[in-house]
Amino acid sequence: MTAVARLTTPFTARTTATEILHGVDLTGRRMIVTGGASGIGAETVRALAGAGAEVTVATRDPGRAVALTEEFAGSGPGSVRAVALDLADLASVDAFVAAWAGPLHALVANAGVMAVPTRQVTPQGWELQLATNYLGHFALVRGLRDHLRAGSGRVVVVSSGAQLRRAVDFDDPQFDRRPYDPWEAYFQSKTADVLLVVGIARHWAADGITANAANPGYVMTNLQRHLDEDTLRAFGVTVDEEGDRTVPDYYKTPAQGAATSVLLAASPMLAGVTGRYFEDNQEAAVVPGGPDATSGVAEHAVDPAAADRLWAYAEQVITSR
């Protein structure tokens, strides 16, 4: 990733998802957005469908996407449908994959959980944050590989600046032995997300499939549902006596937070670009990482050896369920 010049665009941190696609026609393009019923996922869906794409919202509860599907019912060239998908349950992932037919032009791996207070496990016995944020998406992308190949598809994985904090603990990735820490589990899962795109770039380049990671920045959405008031205040959020939240000016709106995902999923500027990490609609610099890092992508998150090791680990746990 450091051997080529960083890609820059004319957009800024405040550009909205819809503005990214001004003048872009996505008619005939088929796309999936996981977790697309709310937050930045919903704004990603709106921008893609608004430009003409056929968008599938993959969500645990399709009923939450009714308003979004109705918004695009018969209103233009784009369309939105909702299909059940629980990334923490491989049976659900398998069912989604089996039901997909035809080419897939973009898959936005947007769904995620943050800082689950206590260690929870999936039906496969996996720690919930690694399962939802990484392993479920790995299984989904892997299952849809032929469809992505047919569509010369793009994979977009929504990561976070949290990847700067920790590398993947390959000795105990599921917190089977070490004490569970909600933030350590989140940091690790977001690093794994970046390593997923590095792995796709390394393993599937001959398929014509590209993959890049996006950091949406600070955005207040349902992702923060597990955070208590003290933690929210530490993130600069004011919480009043009624529980209402006020965010500082440096926070983005969901439409602005979705912009980088949309850039990577559909902008002609990103044609052929793969294995990279973007924030504020620009490719980020590779940095050492650690507690003092505030921007960029950590060296441990784009390390080819770590990407290969994580790929092998994910394949092993997915196939041995």
Image: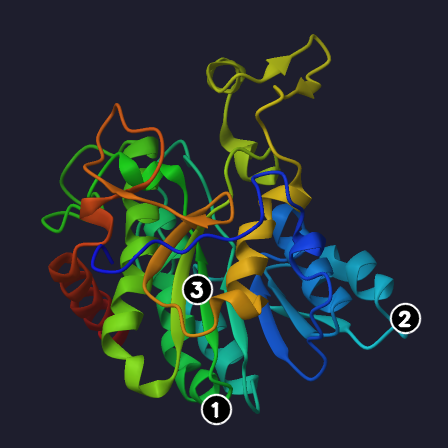
Which residue appears at 46% of the width and 49% of the height? Answer: 282
Which amino acid does the dot numbered 1 rest on? Answer: Ala
Q: CA distance from mark 3 to mark 2?
A: 34 Å
Quadrant in which the C terminus appears: bottom left
- Res 48 → quadrant: bottom right
State whether residue 88 is above or below residue 160: below
Q: Which residue is mark 1?
A: 150
Q: CA distance from mark 1 to mark 2?
A: 28 Å
**Residue 20, image x, y percentages:** 64, 56
Which amino acid does the dot numbered 3 rest on? Answer: Asp
Camera-side residue of 56 and 212: 212
Camera-side residue of 190 and 248: 248
Quadrant in which the N terminus appears: bottom left
Mark 1 touching mark 3, by CB under 8 A?
A: no
Which residue appears at 90% of the width and 75% of the height? Answer: 74
- Mark 3 Cα shell of 10 Å, populated few (<14), some (14-19), many (≥20): some
Q: Which residue is mark 3?
A: 89
Which residue appears at 47% of the width and 84% of the height? Answer: 152
Residue 75: assigned label: 2
